[in-house]
Image (spheres, rainbow, N blue to C red):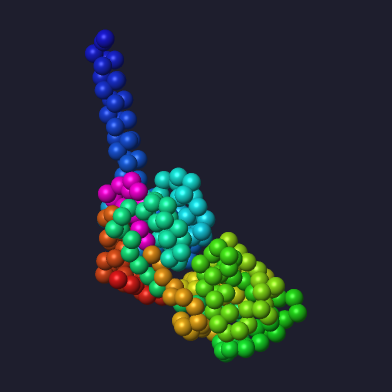
Amino acid sequence: MSARLVALLAAFCLAFASAAAQAQERLLVFAAASLRNALDDAALGFTGPRPVISYAGSSSLAKQIERGAPAALFISADRDWMNYLERRGLLEPGTRRDLLGNRLVLVAPASTASHARIEPGMPLARWLGKRGRLAMGDPNHVPAGKYAKAALESLGVWQSVRGRIAATENVRVALALVARDEAPLGVVYATDAREEPGVRVIGVFDASLHPPIVYPMALLKGAPPAARAFADYLLSDQARAVFRKHGFTPLN
């Protein structure tokens, strides 16, 4: 074998090893859609490998993980979908943490001037008008939708609007419907409403009306060391300050 061929083979092996090492360290994060702005902002302060963050509804992300998606870290918008993965043995033991809290609000298009009293028996159906629909995450799957349904049930108004729901695949889509004036009202997270100039908060739901809004995070089986470092960073004072700036309540 010629010296040149040996050198080429050696270079190829080194390149392959380097690519394999980079793939092993690739930091793919699956996160709830409502975290997009805050998590993107927080990730800028991480000094390790740049994370690749995929945002979608927590239910969709959990199903992708179950089917083998190579995510290293999962941040859900509720405990149910994290429990779903934990029951299937897909989490790295001992790495689950409650990261953030949030609030639910009632929003309307930014041009709306009125306020709404969030109280038992409120005339929500009348506020929607004759043909208007209430935009919210799908209450069967999407965490924001499940929280919203629970709050409306507590207020005794769910039955009056259950047939007039514009159910969406994640809370950001519900927010967009209201911002585009395609729905007169929506129930979304307070943090989402802060990020969208096209909507106006007209009411705030008391936290006692629904289960606590908690965003848990956990490493997934086979996660590279960089994922653990990133998870630790998200619990740091530096990251917590960023989340607080975006309206989230840091936990732990």
Q: Nearer the viewer, residue 245 or 251?
A: 251
| Residue beneath the point at 27% across and 60% down | 232
Give the residue at the far front of this rendering: 87
Does residue 43 sit above or below 199 in this rendering?
above
Q: Position of residue 237 (x, y in %)?
A: 26, 69
Asked if residue 218 lies in the magenta stretch, the reply is yes
Q: Is residue 84 left or right of residue 180?
A: left
Asked if residue 222 lies in the magenta stretch, the reply is yes
Quadrant of the drawing holding the N terminus = top left
Q: Position of residue 94 (x, y in %)?
A: 29, 58
Quadrant of the drawing holding the C terminus = bottom left
| Residue beneath the point at 55% across and 63% down | 141
Which of the 4 image quadrants contains residue 212?
bottom left
Q: Nearer the viewer, residue 130 or 65?
A: 65
Q: Is residue 124 left or right of residue 213?
A: right
Q: Position of residue 121 (x, y in %)?
A: 62, 88
Q: Nearer the viewer, residue 158 or 128?
A: 158
Q: Position of residue 194 (x, y in %)?
A: 48, 75
Q: Which residues are magenta?
A: 217-227
Which of the 4 image quadrants contains residue 228?
bottom left
Q: Is residue 165 left or right of residue 99?
A: right
| Residue beneath the point at 35% across and 58% down | 218
Q: Is residue 50 visible?
A: no
Give the residue at the far top of this rendering: 1
